[in-house]
Amino acid sequence: MNVEQDGLERAVREVFSRQAGTPRASVLDPADAVIRRANRIRRRRALAGMSLAATAIIVVSAGAMQLGQAPPPNGSTVVIGEREQLPEVSGTPTIPPPAPDTGTPLAEVDLVLGETIVTAQGRRVTVVGAGRIERAHRLSEDRGWLAVSAPGLAGRFLWAVAPTGSVQVLLAGADEIVLDRDGRQVAWKQGPVLASARVVNGELASIARAEVPAEAMPLRFVSGAVLVRLAPDRPGHVLWRLHPGAFEPGTDESTSQIFGALPDGRLVGEVVTGKSGATCLTLLDPARDLARTGPECGPRLDGDGLGAVSPDGRWLLANGRSDGGDKALLVDLARLDSSVEPVVAGPAISGAVAWSTPATAYYHADAVGRLARVDVDRATSGGSPTLVAITGLPAGQPPVVISGAELSR
């Protein structure tokens, strides 16, 4: 007994000596804190899932014994866990109510409808364990989706959603999160730190960090670099090329909006002209601090910056002003000069624009409460977009169109 007691005391002393010799963690890096918070959430969910799984096994086993002892009369069916009804769709075109797991596709892009993702192929995937999704991107090779949460008291979350609907937390508590077009890179802002990482097998790797001004926010990836808006109330953007350490603000002080990139890497954006603050559309060279490389001044949009460039770089669909109101405007980028008049393509855009083909785009229009499908040929011929009403969604959660549809083709 004394030998066992001495051994126990030695073991305890060894544990305490190891703890005393372990160096304390350095000052928290905000970018690391976002990942650590996500890892803690993931561990808590795993433990909770194990507990729920054990409970479910007990409940199902008890139910099975009950059913074995007393089968339902007259061949009736016992339902354990009823599936939540999907939102109903109405309007033009008329779409029949969806089946529980698959049905008639609602669009040529994937959609987030409340807690359900409806794919362009008609699959219905219930997302388990995520909150409200504000933006989402479809991954290639049917690997699922990456979803960015709406901002909340705890910041933004980045979730990896499997094709089955299961959710893995990749980031938690970020101020802003952006993804590249392939879903293989992510950038986020947390406090004074801007960070970027590669997404590899559901994990974040090769993290780079830089200190940035408090008002700076990442907007999108451009040819492997992160486009950053320096402040929300004045013109100016810069490309962070993932160099760790100090952040170089650049020399651009004229760009007010950046909508996307052409296949050759040039950016489509608006620049401020003169002291009046008027803006016009042009092309920008990311290799020369966003210097103009297109027309000196193309058409004027005067929108809020929502919009996207088509996959082939031919068209821009973005918000702008027309006939005294906010509209979705279509611009032919192959004829980008001041003589080009943008074409009204539909009601104003709310949220993301997703191009399913180089000539077809989808977005949600809060002004009319409809999902809009814009056909380029129809719009340039004076036709109206196809508007579809999707009802039965939770209050304050309109449909979200998912980008990356072209990756699935």
Image: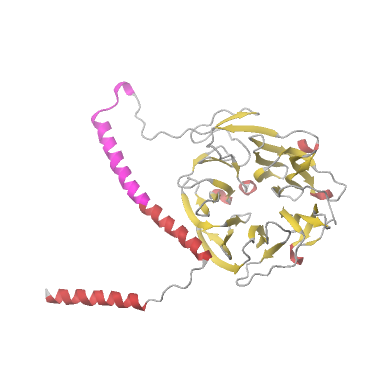
User: Residue 289, relative to residue 406: is it above or below?
Assistant: below
Q: Main secondary structure of the magenta part?
A: helix
Expressed as whole percent of the image width and height from the top left, the position of residue 341 reads 84, 44
Instruction: Locate the N terminus and report the quarter of the image it occupies.
Output: bottom left
Describe residue 380's horizontal placement relative to residue 154 as left or right: right
Expressed as whole percent of the image width and height from the top left, the position of residue 308 reads 70, 48
Scheme of image coloration? secondary structure
Q: Which residues are magenta?
A: 48-75
Expressed as whole percent of the image width and height from the top left, the position of residue 54 reads 31, 47
**Can residue 297 be seen by looking at this rendering?**
yes
Q: Of 290 and 214, which appears nearest the observer?
A: 214
Quarter of the view holding residue 349: top right
Please tell me whether residue 59 belongs to the stretch shown in magenta.
Answer: yes
Expressed as whole percent of the image width and height from the top left, the position of residue 12 reads 25, 74
Q: Of 113 and 238, which appears nearest the observer?
A: 238
Identify the residue at image location x=62%, y=27%: 94
Identify the residue at image location x=78%, y=56%: 271
Quarter of the view holding residue 229: bottom right
Describe residue 35's horizontal placement relative to residue 405 as left or right: left
- Judged from this view, the residue extending furthest toward the right is 339
Please tell me whether residue 376 belongs to the stretch shown in magenta.
Answer: no
User: Residue 278, relative to residue 223: is it above or below?
Assistant: above
Circle count: 0
Identify the residue at image location x=53%, y=40%: 114
**Can residue 310 be seen by looking at this rendering?**
no
Quarter of the view holding residue 197: bottom right
